[in-house]
Image (cartoon, grey):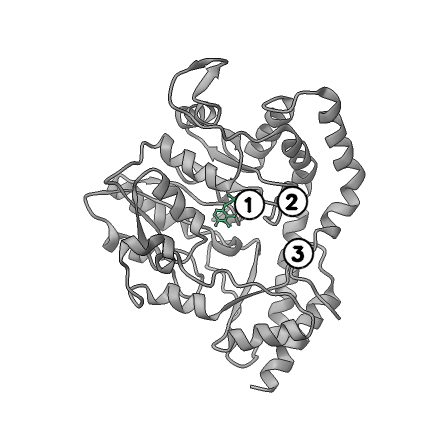
Amino acid sequence: MRVPFLSFAPQHDPLREQILAAIAAVYDKQWYVLGDQVKAFEAAYADFNQVRHCVGVANGLDALHLSLVALNAGPGDEVLVPSNTYIATWLAISFVGATPVPVEPNPATYNIDPARLEAAITPRTKGIMPVHLYGQACEMGPIMEVARRHGLWVVEDNAQAQGATWQRSVTGSFGDVNGTSFYPGKNLGALGDAGAITTNDDALGGKIRTLRNYGSQKKYYNEVIGYNSRLDELQAAVLSVKLPHLMEWTQQRQAIAALYNQHLAGLGDLVLPTVARGATHVYHLYVVRTAHRDALQQHLQEQGIGTLIHYPVPPHRQQAYEHLGIREGVYPIAEALARTSLSLPMWPGMQGEEVAAVAAAVGGFFEGV
Ligand SMILES: *Cc1c(COP(=O)(O)O)cnc(C)c1O
């Protein structure tokens, strides 16, 4: 059985008529940027995310960048960031001229280790950017406590974890201002690029609303040097059709992960996902680890099973960050994760037989090791 890494069909096919009708309504209305659709989606997503404000923006990277602009982060500032994350989190820090300071993850959960934060704080440290990696909520209690003790702001990177919780509060509701992404493959995905910030802070919410639209609230009157980063009406209309189904899709992802956990238990040196006490995991990705990662990926590919590596090179070892001069071995946990992690197929609507086929192929590989 061939199993792709990801299929949109079970999510989109049952909603096809509704999605196309929503697109047609925008087409007919002839109002394409910052209109009723964006307003309605912002209200619905703020409600879902249990925050006062949601501001739609063009993509997840912009959501993080505008968050840092709104917090006045700039040159000379240091921002604590996971050593193992998608590069977008680091790029947002670089865009404002601040310096990313890597902090190693908990090697079991892969999320930033709250116990390592304090050692990385200097007089220049201004904030922390926790990333709810692969869909698991970070330990936000201890993180917020360190932030409060040292007067730091927090910006959550919630691109992978819409609907995850830490002690029953949803990710994207803890930080001063938080960014998320609706890139198509994310748990809530648009049919193109889209993103949002979420916040309970009226002033920061208002500032980002202005920043995303040329620094202007009143057309042709510009208060600040702003950006063009707007969520468009078409994507907002599609997202509004999909949002009511997000919790049901999340439950499907969790059921698939539970099935994987059953099938894959005890195979060779394979390490399965661990969820921290107090956190929930919405399985944007189902990531396993093995010392034989590359051979396993090759084997699965030969069996027609799609996998991906998230991520093969940690940000501090990317050419883009050569100037930081961080040698190999300084962040060994992130580097070990980059060498050993493999993401198995995962999407809402994936069938039990498909999960079993992937697991059987993984099992077959470890028989030969
Ligand atoms: C996808 C992603 C982003 C960026 O989102 P885009 O919409 O692609 O700009 C940022 N951080 C993380 C962790 C992501 O997975």
- Rendered view: 352 above or below 184: below
Q: Position of residue 10 (x, y in %)?
A: 74, 52
Residue type at mark 1 is Gln
Sequence-wise first label, 1 or 2: 1
- Residue 71 seen in the current view: yes
Q: How many C-alpha atoms fall within 10 Å of the one at disc 1: few (<14), some, or many (≥20)?
A: many
Q: Is mark 2 within 8 Å of ligand 1?
A: no
Q: How many C-alpha atoms fall within 10 Å of the one at disc 3: few (<14), some, or many (≥20)?
A: many
Callout 3: SS: loop
Q: Where is residue 89 in the image (x, y as percent from the top left)?
A: 42, 47
- Is the C terminus in the top left, top right, bottom left or bottom right quadrant? bottom right
Query: CB atoms at circles 1 and 2 under 8 Å apart?
Result: yes
Question: Which residue in the protein does label 1 denote?
Answer: 162
- Is the N terminus in the top left, top right, bottom left or bottom right quadrant? bottom right
Question: Which residue in the protein does label 3 denote?
Answer: 347
Question: Which residue in the protein does label 2 denote?
Answer: 246
- Rendered view: 132 above or below 92: below
